[in-house]
Amino acid sequence: MAGPQQLPAEPEQTGPQDDGRERDTALAALQDLVREIDRCAVELQGARERAELLLAERRTGRAWLDIVSAEARPLVVERITTVLSALAGAGSAWRRAQARALQDEQVSINRIAALFGVTRQRISALLREPASDPVPDPDAAPPA
């Protein structure tokens, strides 16, 4: 059995470097991810409840066509697709912002790759991607 993965040594950092940014984009991306996870958990609970109803209908002997044709939108499969897409977007934004934050703290690409469990080439590509806008907060007031 292999032991824990050894990470390349890096100088210890005591906190974020003052790089002149007014806002911590990694923190904002993580907050967006948490909000998205919460929204998706609610959506998945609704999908699960609907799926239980579909199971009960199928167990009575109804045909799948009849069940799906009568199902109200969004369908269970549509809800799941929406959740997966939302989590992928928020997760990607968080991963990219976190990699940039680590780089801003002078962490090497090799070390970031080891921390993320990917190749250094993947981290290089991630750092070259343009920053995306954070996931909009539906509870936030619209811009004035």
Image (spheres, rainbow, N blue to C red):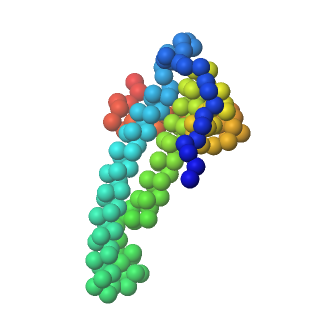
Seen in the picture, residue 59 relative to 51 is either above or below; the reply is below
* Residue farthest to the bottom, as pictured: 61
- Residue 131 seen in the figure: no
- Residue 116 seen in the figure: yes
Q: Which image quadrant for residue 120? A: top right
Q: Horizontal placement of 94 versus 139: left or right? A: right
Task: From the viewer's side, name the closer residue of 99 and 106.
Answer: 106
Task: From the viewer's side, name the closer residue of 40 and 1.
Answer: 1
Question: Residue 116 in the image: x percent, y percent?
Answer: 57, 39
Question: Residue 40 in the image: x percent, y percent?
Answer: 38, 50
Residue sitting at x 47%, y 48%: 86
Residue sitting at x 49%, y 17%: 15
Q: Horizontal placement of 58 versus 105: left or right? A: left
Question: Residue 5 in the image: x percent, y percent?
Answer: 58, 41
Q: Quadrant of the C terminus?
A: top left
* Residue farthest to the right, as pictured: 121
Task: From the viewer's side, name the closer residue of 98 and 63.
Answer: 98
Q: Which image quadrant for residue 65? A: bottom left
Question: Residue 59 in the image: x percent, y percent?
Answer: 30, 83
Q: Which image quadrant for residue 122? A: top right
Residue sitting at x 39%, y 62%: 74
Seen in the picture, residue 45 relative to 66 is either above or below; the reply is above
Image mark count = 0
